Image: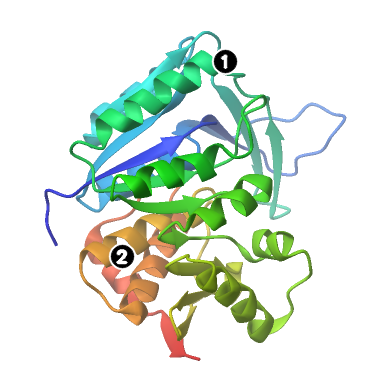
């Protein structure tokens, strides 16, 4: 794998993930926080962090509010991530996650994000065009902020593919539906996002594979469908593999899908076959489940977790 390969991740709607541990959390009464942690987050930021943990050169771009950039600046500096994010007036949104170990529950409280202006998007496209000079891969991840057209990812995929770049897409809803026709190299929906995309519930591996193959026929190179504890299906050309993870202790589910994206990119750069990429990507995801915040354990631990993943050709 070339250590010179640079990957840029795009976060149109990043967030600060505020995690609070509250045993026996109850609405309508005073709750005591046992422990709390704030992390720079958003799907693209998470992917950049995981890639950096894997020893790859990552660049983060996207839209940050200039009133609360500190967690992002600190993360990028600590992990050696190149910061090419635009600063907008206002605050980056905050996602509060209340974890209750006693009841084994998680409560999410998500604040609204920034509302970029058309001129901000023009600046962002100029930044992405400049990154094309020394960037081989682009990962487009996460939701689209209010006021931004849903076809923004479709336009960016076409633009980047026109520059000869490899493009990974991880989003949902209308932005996913519109961008798949632009033929990204890799798409990673979860099973619910894929079901929404095809307009029907998906029951069993056969239906999931059929839906993934429809995307392949439309020009997508690889479709990875995450299914939580049931594992993930990886479909590429005529090949299909199922990666089934072992049972582990879960500290946080935040970023597990983003870690899988980072693992797919890493495995591709290592020249692994489909089964190898599925195994490594699931290992990355398992590693993220054992951490709070967008971090991976050591690569030795990732390798150990990956070895425990059962990969079956279907």
Query: How far across and how far down the image is residue 294, in percent?
Result: 42, 44
User: What secondary structure is found at the residue carrying circle 1?
Assistant: loop
Q: Residue at x 42, y 14 (%)?
A: 87
Where residue 86 sits, quadrant-wise, is top left
Residue 211 to residue 140: above or below: below
Q: Which residue is mark 1?
A: 117
Q: Residue visible at 60% across and 73% down? A: 214
Q: Residue at x 66, y 58 (%)?
A: 193
In the image, residue 309 sits, relative to residue 162, either above or below, namely below
* Residue 245 drawn at (x, y percent): 48, 76
Residue 132 seen in the figure: yes
Q: Earlier in the sequence, mark 2 or mark 1?
A: 1
Foreground tag (2 vs 1): 1
Q: Against 177, is 71 above or below?
A: above
- Is 195 left, or right, of 184 in this rendering? right
Residue, far right: 28
Element type at mark 2: helix
- Provide the residue designation for mark 2: 302
> Is 137 or 22 nearer to us in this picture?
137
Q: Position of residue 91 (x, y in %)?
A: 55, 14
- The answer to whether one can see residue 245 in this image is no
């Amino acid at each position: 794998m070339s250590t010179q390969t640079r990957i840029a991740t795009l976060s149109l709607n990043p967030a600060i993930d505020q995690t609070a541990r509250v045993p026996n959390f109850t609405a309508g009464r005073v709750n005591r926080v046992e422990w709390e942690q704030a992390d720079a987050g958003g799907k693209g930021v998470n992917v950049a962090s995981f890639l950096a943990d894997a020893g790859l050169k990552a660049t983060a771009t996207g839209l940050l509010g200039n009133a609360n950039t500190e967690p992002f600046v600190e993360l990028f500096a600590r992990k050696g991530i190149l910061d090419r994010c635009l600063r907008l007036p206002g605050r980056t949104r905050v996602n509060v996650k209340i974890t209750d170990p006693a009841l084994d529950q998680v409560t999410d409280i998500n604040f609204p994000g920034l509302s970029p202006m058309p001129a901000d998007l023009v600046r962002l496209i100029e930044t992405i065009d400049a990154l094309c000079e020394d960037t081989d891969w682009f990962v487009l991840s996460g939701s689209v902020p209010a006021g931004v057209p849903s076809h923004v990812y479709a336009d960016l995929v076409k633009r980047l593919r026109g520059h000869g770049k490899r493009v990974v897409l991880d989003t949902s809803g209308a932005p996913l539906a519109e961008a798949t026709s632009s033929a990204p190299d890799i798409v990673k929906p979860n099973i619910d996002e894929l079901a929404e995309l095809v307009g029907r519930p998906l029951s069993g591996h056969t239906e999931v594979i059929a839906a993934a193959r429809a995307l392949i026929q439309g020009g997508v190179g690889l479709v990875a469908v995450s299914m939580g504890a049931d594992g993930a299906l990886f479909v590429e050309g005529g090949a299909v593999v199922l990666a089934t993870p072992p049972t582990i202790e879960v500290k946080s589910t935040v970023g597990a899908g983003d870690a899988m994206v980072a693992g797919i990119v890493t495995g591709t750069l290592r020249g692994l076959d489909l089964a190898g990429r599925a195994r490594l990507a699931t290992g990355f995801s398992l590693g993220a489940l054992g951490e709070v915040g967008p971090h991976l354990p050591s690569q030795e631990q990732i390798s150990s977790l990956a070895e425990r993943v059962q990969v079956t050709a279907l």
